[in-house]
């Protein structure tokens, strides 16, 4: 199992690539929409890129539960192959 | 004619000759060709391996993350629109009185094709969520509207190679009818990609002078063998003359009149006698209040195709007469399709403004039927009162714009 900080770093890379988010701003307690300004279309890109990077399936009805970076980390940790 | 005078107060462009209006104009007057060899690997199997690519890549001017959600044609429209807006001195117009009319001949075709490649290779889930706003033909107009906050309407006329000119004609109507006070109008096109090139090649519409790219676009020359595909964007700011004067704006020219007709003849062939073009030019003359003898210069559509170039000459004979000095700036820019009428309007406006007509390069051996005065090889210095810009498009669209010295 990947450790949480490793997943945060991976998500920060994705967020920088697709939404121009400064990696230094990415932390577990940050909300994707409120704090990091990721709009709904960019969130779709983040999810697809995360699926590829972490070898995990993130169904659309699960995405709404991923409010914060930490939520995503937990989901990836639990479900990654 | 109408009670409201409409003037041009801002110009913006990115073209194969330069990343802005100043560098483009300088190259036009100097007679430089923007056509070159397509070095990309995908070009190797194509019958046409030349094109007029942008001199300054739009990604040099737009932040990387933003380019992910903008088709190249949208990036170019945004760059040209901001340049025009700043050139106009950023008019202090209420957003509800600001409109946008920006068209594209083909739209976001390279986005469509690239996303199709992704879908074929990796499946539908990998298709970008930005695909639709990137490929929709109103995308460039919508983005320009967003950037400037325009709220009086955002429109995207599309009429193939007449698009840029039609956009300007519609802008004139919008101001005259009182629906807006300032309109940002023009065209953009970015389809240098193997599929559009293959399609135009299959029509036998393009020059195959692959070994001499700079000589490939040669309107009215006996050895012309088709157009050269180019990419670019041209956008102008049009506004009511009274408010432009009141705010002390620099005025490049007056848009005196426009004419738009359709051939009703063939989906791609121009009428051999150019009758639809004649009607468009005459309509523009009537609208402008000028007599045909007042027109001192024509920026012709002349794309370097065997049939089209001479049909336009016949039309000009009928509608304008013999006094005007012609040029085809496509000899240098290549054919910018939906942006052509807008970039060529800018060339026409600057010709009036500076009293300089850019040359038609490569006119070494004129067609026997060319019996009008063309500024061949070298720019011509002429004091002008009024000038005509012609644009014609597949589908039988004819657009004629008459600009007058302000």
Image (cartoon, coloured by chain):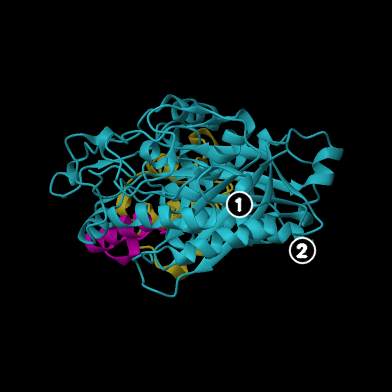
Q: Is residue B374 above or below residue A60?
A: above
Q: Extreme bottom residue here?
A: B264
Figure quadrant of the C terminus of chain B: top right
User: Which residue sits at x=84%, y=45%?
Assistant: B242
* Residue closest to the eye, B53 or B400: B400
In the image, which residues are magenta? B104-128
| Circle 1: element type | helix
Q: Is residue B93 above or below residue B358?
A: below
For disc 2, the neighbor class at 10 Å (few under 14, some 14 to 19, many from 20) is few
Q: Extreme right residue here?
A: B246
| Circle 2: element type | loop
* Residue closest to the eye, B120 or B308: B308
What secondary structure prevails in the magenta region?
helix
Q: What hue represents chain A?
A: yellow
* Residue closest to the eye, B276 or A37: B276
Figure quadrant of the N terminus of chain B: bottom right
User: Which residue sits at x=22%, y=58%?
Assistant: B204
Nearer-N-terminus badge (2/1): 2
Q: What hue represents chain B?
A: cyan
Q: Specify the label residue B292 is tagged with.
A: 1
């Amino acid at each position: 199992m990947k450790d949480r900080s490793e997943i945060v770093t991976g998500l920060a890379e994705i967020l920088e690539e697709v939404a121009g988010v400064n990696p230094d701003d990415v932390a577990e307690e940050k909300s994707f929409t409120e704090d990091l300004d990721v709009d709904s279309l960019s969130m779709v890109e983040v999810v697809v890129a995360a699926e590829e990077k972490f070898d995990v399936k993130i169904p659309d009805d699960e995405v709404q539960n991923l409010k914060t970076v930490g939520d995503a980390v937990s989901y990836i940790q639990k479900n990654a192959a | 004619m109408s009670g409201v005078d409409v003037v041009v107060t801002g110009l913006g462009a990115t073209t194969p000759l330069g990343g802005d209006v100043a560098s483009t104009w300088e190259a036009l007057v100097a007679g430089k060709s923007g056509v070159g060899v397509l070095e990309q690997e995908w070009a190797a199997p194509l019958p046409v391996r030349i094109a007029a690519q942008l001199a300054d890549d739009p990604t040099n001017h737009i932040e990387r993350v933003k380019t992910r959600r903008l088709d190249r044609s949208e990036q170019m429209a945004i760059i040209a629109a901001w340049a025009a807006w700043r050139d106009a001195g950023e008019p202090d117009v209420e957003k509800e009185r600001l409109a946008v009319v920006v068209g594209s001949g083909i739209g976001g075709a390279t986005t469509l094709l690239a996303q199709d490649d992704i879908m074929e290779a990796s499946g539908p889930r990998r298709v970008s969520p930005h695909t639709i706003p990137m490929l929709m033909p109103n995308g460039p107009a919508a983005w320009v509207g967003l950037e400037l906050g325009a709220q009086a309407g955002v429109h995207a006329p599309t009429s193939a190679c007449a698009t840029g000119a039609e956009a300007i004609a519609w802008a004139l109507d919008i101001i005259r009818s009182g629906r807006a006070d300032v309109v940002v109008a023009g065209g953009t096109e970015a389809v240098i990609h193997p599929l559009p090139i293959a399609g135009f090649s299959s029509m036998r519409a393009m020059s195959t002078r692959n070994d001499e790219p700079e000589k490939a676009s040669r309107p009215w020359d006996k050895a012309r063998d088709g157009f050269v595909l180019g990419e670019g964007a041209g956008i102008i700011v049009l506004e009511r003359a009274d408010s432009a004067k009141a705010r002390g704006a620099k005025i490049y020219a007056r848009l005196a009149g426009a004419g738009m007709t359709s051939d009703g003849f063939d989906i791609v062939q121009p009428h051999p006698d150019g009758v639809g073009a004649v009607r468009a030019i005459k309509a523009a003359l009537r609208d402008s209040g000028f007599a045909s003898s007042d027109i001192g210069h024509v920026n012709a559509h002349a794309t370097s195709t065997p049939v089209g170039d001479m049909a336009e000459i016949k039309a000009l004979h009928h509608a304008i007469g013999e006094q005007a000095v012609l040029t085809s700036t496509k000899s240098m820019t290549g054919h910018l399709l939906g942006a052509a009428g807008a970039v060529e309007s800018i060339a026409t406006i600057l010709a009036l403004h500076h009293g300089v007509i850019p040359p038609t390069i490569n006119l070494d051996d004129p067609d026997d039927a060319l019996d009008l005065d063309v500024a061949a090889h070298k720019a011509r210095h002429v004091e002008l009162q009024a000038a005509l810009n012609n644009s014609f498009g597949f589908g039988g669209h004819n657009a004629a714009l008459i600009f007058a010295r302000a």
